[in-house]
Amino acid sequence: MSLWRLYLVSLLALLPIATFVVAGIVALWRTGDYLWLWWLLPVCWVPAWLLARRWRQQLVAPAATGVPDIDHWTARDREAWELVQAAQRDAAEIPADRLLDPHFYLQTAMDLGLRVAKQYHPKAKDPLSSRTVLEILSVAQLAIEDSHRWIADYVPGSHLLTIDQWRLLAKTPKWWRLASNVGWLASIAINPLNVTRFVVSKLALGSATKQLQENALAWGYAVFIGRVGFYLIEMNSGRLRIGADRYKSLTRRAAPTSGELGADASSEPADSQGAANEPCEVVVAVVGQVKAGKSSVINALLGQRAAASDVLPTTRDVRRYRVQQLDQPDSRWTLLDTPGYAEDGATDQQTQAIRTALAEADLVLLVMKVTSLARQADAAVLNDLAANQRHRPNRKPPPVLGVLTHIDQLSPVMEWSPPYDWNHPTGRKEEQIQESVRYHRELLAPTVAGIVPVCSDVEHEREFGIAEFLLPAMLQLLGEARGCAVLRIMSDEGRSGQVRRIFTQLAQAGAALLQKK
């Protein structure tokens, strides 16, 4: 749309309003009600000014509070986000003229980038030197896509106006103040008493309008800082080594919401040109003592006895199974059956096998026989998991779900008539189940996310708690487990195939050069 067409459309839109205003003023003047109704403006403007002052911080604060609910973020990522929040809170103190300067945004992004980089790499001297070219390009691609969606959704007329027209609209407040002053001069010339109302309206409306304008700019600045900070964290964590398309494919359900960062960055599926949206594999490691019931729990989860067709490629001591009944549209579940260990602890070979499984796990099922009181070996496994996690700051610790088996052997032993509502016990069996769950929850807290009681004795037709408690508990932890899976996949794909990729790039570049010749 050309400039003169914009003027014409604006004139046609505003002319009726101006006509009605002038006609109304003339009519009120003739009836004598003009002097009384004129006070309505300052009467409304003074409360508007007071409310604007009261709500000033609240208008900016929502974009700068809270930590994004992102499943794949680690503790170090959340510490880095505190730096972003500090920069967002500074928005209320920045003069409005600086918030209109594009160079200020660039400099702010670079300063924030250095602070975030030092959080991950304390010896960093600038925001970009330690990052690869593809990581920087991925940040640019993702940030541009976010900006496009945000401007298209929240900036009125952004799909119609050119840059010149936007610059013209930026001067609109000056035009409005000029027109308002001319109107006030005319009214004072007609009635000198209007000078009092002029002073009141300027103090009230002028201040309120200025505050609203400053808050709008500060809100936009806070959103900008949030988006930049989010991708600076993703870049410095090394998660963008896999490229923007693969990143979007893996994090499409783990992105911040619009209320947190100003736009939904990665919730949309990757387009047809990007990586395919194949389900994310969530790996569940099943650990426990010998005769704790690991095999029966795995069989119950598989829905049948483990057969050769169910077994995926195996390691020496860890067997892998696919759990079809847990598969979700965006997630595929795999079980790792680890070797059972004795009450006095695991052997060196068993420990190595369990560590290998836990290093790959996104969720851990700690299977414990409810009638056994020896928990030192189980606690040792959890402690080993925590110790190994401290050496992997780029990975999240997988949630641990305790599974109490053989609940049919609780007192009274001869009774077995499920279902049992152990959360609201009415009988001795339910009371025993509830007490066992409470005891283990307190014993293993805070290392376990929950305790689930089950009986998986399929041979004796005593199966209860798998579908009722265990499966829902696992699905409830899907978000956290999937966040661990995303980090694991990103880490594996970021390290693997680097040399092979270089040869592929050389071949493609050579083919392109030969084709040009």
Image (cartoon, rainbow, N blue to C red):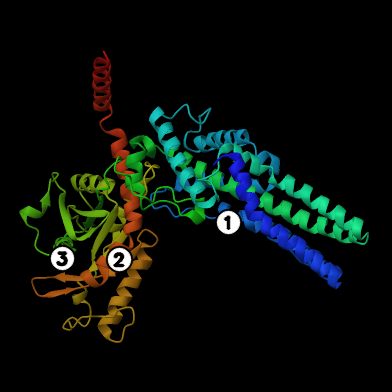
Quadrant of the drawing holding the N terminus: top right
Tag 1 secondary structure: helix
Q: For residue 17, what is the image quadrant? A: bottom right
Q: Position of residue 399 (x, y in %)?
A: 34, 56
Q: Position of residue 176 (x, y in %)?
A: 74, 49
Q: Do the CB atoms of the residues marked 3 and 1 lie less than 8 Å apart?
A: no
- Label 3 Cα crowd, 10 Å radius (few <14 / some 14-19 / many 20+): many
Looking at the image, which residue sits at the far left?
Answer: 308
Label 3 to label 1: alpha-carbon separation: 47 Å
Tag 2 secondary structure: helix
Work out whether 121 lies above or below 213.
above
Horizontal side of residue 274 vs 96, given as left or right = left
Residue depicted at x 60% and y 33%: 107
Res 429 seen here: yes
Q: Do the CB atoms of the residues marked 3 and 2 lie less than 8 Å apart?
A: no
Query: Residue 148 versus residue 488: which sits nearer the camera?
Result: 148
- Going from N to C along the chain, the mark reached first, 3 or 1, is 1
Work out whether 367 lies above or below 73.
below
Q: Which residue is mark 3?
A: 300
Badge number at residue 423: none
Query: Residue 99 versus residue 191: which sits nearer the camera?
Result: 191
Residue depicted at x 79% and y 63%: 46
Q: For residue 410, what is the image quadrant? A: bottom left
Badge number at residue 62: 1
Tag 3 secondary structure: helix
Q: Which residue is mark 2?
A: 473
- Going from N to C along the chain, the mark reached first, 3 or 2, is 3
